[in-house]
Amino acid sequence: MTPKRILLAEDDVDDRDMFSIFLSSRADIELAGFAENGVEVIELLGNISESGKLPDMIVLDQNMPKQNGLQTLEMLKESNSYQHIPVFVYSTYADSNMEARSIQAGALAVFSKPYSFEGYHEMMNSMLKLVMDK
């Protein structure tokens, strides 16, 4: 089975490190790159698309500097080059309003940030199932 390539947008260093350590424990997931904000997501996708290896999914932190997750999601879904990529939003403070706005903008789902490796596994399993079912 070919691993799913994930692009992660996360500005918090501790959360990025935790996610990276978690991803290294799974053979079914490959990290396509990290971005610290939405502006970097668009730049990174531009660089990646030149190699023809766009990610299979994108995970956006909602609360990032320069351009938050929802703003980035809207840009991705307006782009002919990236609108086909499934996008997930996750946040420490996910509420029903943010979830509804994200889904309306094109997110496949919204998740609360996990606090344990077990939580990361559950979140990732849910994301992968949604991508496979799409």
Image (tube, rainbow, N blue to C red):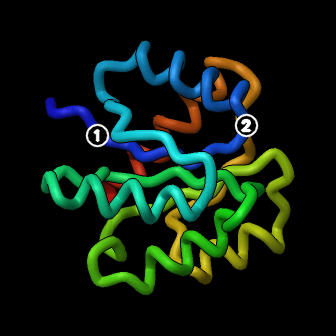
Q: Secondary structure at mark 2?
A: loop
Nearest to viewer (mark 1 / mark 2): 2
Q: Which residue is mark 2?
A: 12
Question: In which quarter of the view is residue 81 placed?
Answer: bottom left
Circle 1: residue type: Lys
Choose between 24 and 106: the one closer to the eye.
24
Question: In which quarter of the view is residue 99 placed?
Answer: bottom right
Q: Secondary structure at mark 1?
A: strand
Distance Cα–Cα, label 1 vs label 2: 23 Å
Residue 9 lies, in percent from the top left, at 56, 49
| Residue found at x 82% / y 68% | 96
Residue 59 lies, in percent from the top left, at 52, 50
| Residue found at x 39% / y 43% | 6
Circle 2: residue type: Asp
Q: Is residue 91 above or below residue 14?
A: below
Residue 13 is left or right of residue 44, and the answer is: right
Q: Which mark is residue 134?
A: none
Q: Is residue 23 above or below residue 108?
A: above
Q: Quadrant of the C terminus?
A: bottom left
Residue 67 is left or right of residue 3, and the answer is: right
Q: Which mark is residue 4?
A: 1
Residue 83 is left or right of residue 105, and the answer is: left
Question: In which quarter of the view is residue 54 placed?
Answer: bottom left
Choose between 48 and 116: the one closer to the eye.
48
Residue 132 lies, in percent from the top left, at 30, 52
| Residue found at x 50% / y 36% | 124
